[in-house]
Image (tube, rainbow, N blue to C red):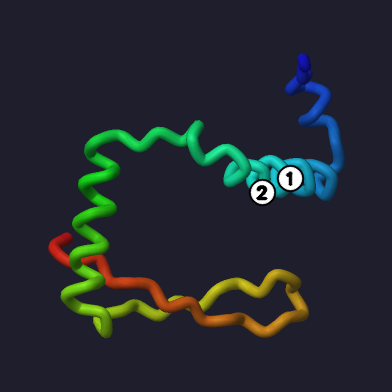
Amino acid sequence: MAVNLCELLQLPIEERLKLVQALWDSIPEFPEALELSAAQKQELDRRLEAYVRFPDDRLQLVRQPDDLAGTPRTLDLPRVVGR
């Protein structure tokens, strides 16, 4: 399937955002296509170990609401230890 980038860029912003969302949502359908490098695997292992050792050491972020009229939600993330 040939896709013309110039034509896609001519779409209205709302249509481009829908296209981006559809593409993003399709990524988990093929997890085997996402090969992690050794360095990425090592970093994930390091972060998991930090989480296991310090489960209460978390950052709290305020997320933008999905719609502008919505209420912002908080998102707890593990603090990156050793950085």
Q: Position of residue 29 (x, y in %)?
A: 62, 42
User: 64 or 80: which is nearer to us?
Assistant: 80
Instruction: Report the number of numbered marks.
Output: 2
Query: Looking at the picture, which amino acid does disc 1 mark?
Result: Ala
Q: Does 36 appear above or below 43?
A: above
**Crowdedness of circle 1 by 10 Å Cα count: few (<14), some, many (20+)?**
few
State the image coordinates of residue 37 (x, y, percent, origin top left): 30, 34
Q: Are marks 2 and 1 in contact (CB under 8 Å)?
A: yes
Lateral position of residue 2 relative to residue 47, left or right? right
Give 20 or 54, whichever is nearer the viewer: 54
Asked if residue 69 is positioned above or below residue 1 in the image, the reply reads: below
User: Mark 1 sits on what residue?
Assistant: 22
Q: Is residue 12 left or right of residue 43?
A: right
Residue 2 position, x and y percent, is 77, 15
Which image quadrant for residue 73?
Answer: bottom right
Viewed as shown, does residue 68 lie left or right of 48?
right
Residue nearest the viewer, comparing 40 with 74: 40
In the image as oriented, which residue stretches furthest toward the left? 82
Tell me if 43 is positioned left or right of 23 in this view: left
Residue in the image at 34% along x and 77% along y: 59
Work out how far the residue at label 2 is from the one at label 1, CA to CA, in angstroms.
5 Å
Residue 69 figure quarter = bottom right
Locate the C terminus and report the quarter of the image it occupies.
bottom left
According to the image, label 2 marks what residue? 25
Identify the residue shown where x is 19% and y is 68%: 50
Look at label 2 and name its amino acid: Asp
Residue extending farthest top: 2
Q: Is residue 62 above or below residue 22?
A: below
Residue 40's tag is none
Name the element at disc 2: helix
Local packing at callout 2 (Cα closer than 10 Å; few below 14, some 14-19, many 20+) is few
The residue that appears at 20% across and 78% down in the rendered structure is 54
